[in-house]
Image (cartoon, rainbow, N blue to C red):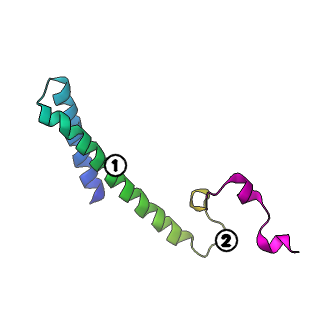
Amino acid sequence: ELLKELDELKAELATLRVAKVSGGAASKLAKIKIVRKGIARILTVYNQKQKSEARKACKGKKFVPLDLRPKKTRAIRRALKVEQKYM
């Protein structure tokens, strides 16, 4: 359902941009920003759902994909773990 709504908003944005070029009303020009924000919201929700599904799929496995690992900083990622420090 998210992808259908996304397609509708993208089509609406395309028509609004055509109206902008052809000298449309001010209300249509103001609506462009609203539609763009709507597209961004849908994409955010969609990406969050995909990432959570990927986390569920990788749970309990030995290796986790790079984009699902904690970001932190390069130095922290390469530092010794607590159990390694006191060996």
Q: Does residue 16 appear anywhere in the picture?
A: yes
How many residues crowd around disc 2 within 10 Å: few (fewer than 14), some, or many (20 or more)?
few
Q: Is residue 85 magenta?
A: yes
Kindly identify the residue that appears in the image at 67 percent across and 54 percent down. Answer: 73
Check the image and name the residue furthest to the left: 25
Kindly identify the residue that appears in the image at 19 percent across and 28 percent down. Answer: 20
Q: Nearer the viewer, residue 77 or 42?
A: 77
- Which residue bears the numbered disc 1? 40
Kindly identify the residue that appears in the image at 78 percent across and 60 percent down. Answer: 79
Q: In which quarter of the image is residue 47?
A: bottom left
- Which residue bears the numbered disc 2? 62
Q: What stretch is highlighted in magenta?
A: 70-87
- Residue 8: image location, x then y, percent: 22, 48
Kindly identify the residue that appears in the image at 22 percent across and 31 percent down. Answer: 17
Q: Which of 46 and 28 is in front in this view?
A: 28
Mark sitting on residue 14: none
Q: Pick the quarter of the image with the C terminus.
A: bottom right
Q: Pick the quarter of the image with the N terminus.
A: bottom left
- Residue 3: image location, x then y, percent: 30, 54
